[in-house]
């Protein structure tokens, strides 16, 4: 076992986050079989019904376990890992789409409320936005959007309820104040796209602030109908979720 493998074993153990089986060849969270599956399901991005939004992976048993570990087990670097193993990091279709949206784009992570930041210690969307900006030669921009209202988890909410839950939750600094050309493309980055309520709320705040060409990129896309069933399954596996 080399030094890198030894460090991975020390920090993460030898259990694959994807399948739960013991393995000495984690990378650093997935065994070779799960890593191969991840790359395959991220070969092509998903379009969640909007031309200005793409998602890097579908929500399935593998990606859901990774996203839950990222959010609730302190494994924030999984956000970068997902981007690196998507068709962005592998210089495929998603990277071509992002590059077609514009050059030197700011990547704006969906912000978390200060209370959530104190609880969790990090914003996983910021980690994803950083990785995307590095691959696209853009810039991570964390001082544009702010979450001004603390809202509960949306997992068990329907489409209309989700929209109401995040209505007015975000505010944005003006494009003029930040000296960013408002017509240039900017990309809002979130972890999971279900109904688009969160990113749409961010987009409305940005439009009020003078921004025009607003795009969206998320790590995962989950069909709204499956979200409630997923949270019930996750609880049986012992995952702690934000509404608990």
Image (tube, rainbow, N blue to C red):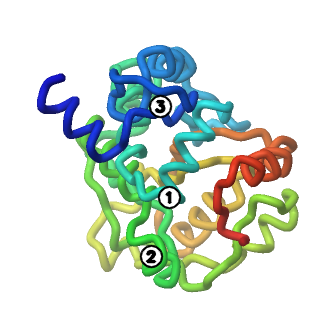
Cα separation, mark 2 vs mark 1, equals 29 Å
Q: Earlier in the sequence, mark 3 or mark 1?
A: 3
Residue in the picture at 39% in, 33% down: 14
| Residue 67 at least partly seen | yes
Q: Secondary structure at mark 1?
A: loop
Q: Is residue 155 left or right of residue 171?
A: right
Residue neighbourhood size for the residue with mark 1, other residues' Cα within 10 Å, grouped as few (<14), some (14–19), many (≥20): some
Foreground tag (3 vs 1): 3
Secondary-structure class at tag 3: loop
Residue 77 percent coordinates (x, y):
35, 48
Q: Position of residue 8 (x, y in %)?
A: 27, 38
Residue 117 - label? 2
202 or 175: nearer the viewer: 202
Q: Which residue is mark 3?
A: 16
Q: Earlier in the sequence, mark 3 or mark 2?
A: 3
Q: Quadrant of residue 160?
A: bottom right
Q: Position of residue 208 (x, y in %)?
A: 56, 74
Q: Quadrant of the N terminus?
A: top left
Can residue 183 be seen? no
The residue at the point 29 percent across, 40 percent down is: 103
Name the foreground residue: 227 vs 240. 240
Q: Earlier in the sequence, mark 2 or mark 1?
A: 2
Residue at 41% from the left image edge and 78% from the top image edge: 173
Alpha-carbon distance for marks 3 and 1? Answer: 43 Å
Assign a secondary structure to mark 2: helix
Q: Badge 2: few (under 14), some or many (20 or more) residues near its Cα, within 10 Å?
A: few
Image-based side of 19 in relation to 27, left or right = right
For the view shown, which residue lies furthest in the left direction?
3
Q: CA distance from mark 3 to mark 2?
A: 27 Å
Looking at the image, is 136 positioned above or below residue 74? above
- The tag on residue 212 is 1
């Amino acid at each position: 076992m080399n030094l890198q493998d030894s460090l991975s074993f020390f920090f993460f153990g030898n259990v694959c986050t994807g399948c739960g089986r013991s393995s000495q060849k984690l990378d650093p969270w997935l065994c070779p079989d799960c890593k191969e599956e991840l790359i395959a399901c991220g070969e092509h991005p998903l379009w969640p019904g909007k031309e200005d939004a793409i998602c890097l992976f579908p929500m399935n048993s593998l990606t859901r376990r990774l996203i839950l570990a990222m959010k609730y087990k302190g494994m924030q670097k999984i956000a970068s890992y997902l981007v690196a193993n998507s068709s962005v990091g592998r210089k495929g279709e998603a990277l071509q789409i992002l590059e077609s949206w514009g050059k030197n784009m700011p990547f704006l992570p969906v912000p978390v409320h200060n209370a959530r930041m104190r609880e969790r210690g990090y914003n996983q969307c910021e980690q994803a936005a950083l990785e995307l900006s590095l691959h696209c030669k853009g810039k991570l921009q964390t001082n544009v959007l702010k979450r001004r209202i603390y809202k509960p988890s949306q997992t068990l909410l329907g489409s209309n309820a989700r929209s109401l839950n995040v209505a007015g939750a975000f505010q944005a600094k003006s494009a003029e104040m930040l000296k960013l050309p408002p017509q240039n493309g900017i990309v809002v980055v979130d972890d999971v796209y279900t109904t688009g309520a969160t990113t749409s709320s961010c987009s409305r705040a940005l439009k009020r602030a003078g921004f025009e060409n607003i795009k969206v990129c998320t790590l995962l896309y989950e069909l709204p109908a499956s979200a409630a069933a997923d949270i019930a399954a996750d609880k049986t596996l012992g995952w702690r979720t934000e509404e608990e």
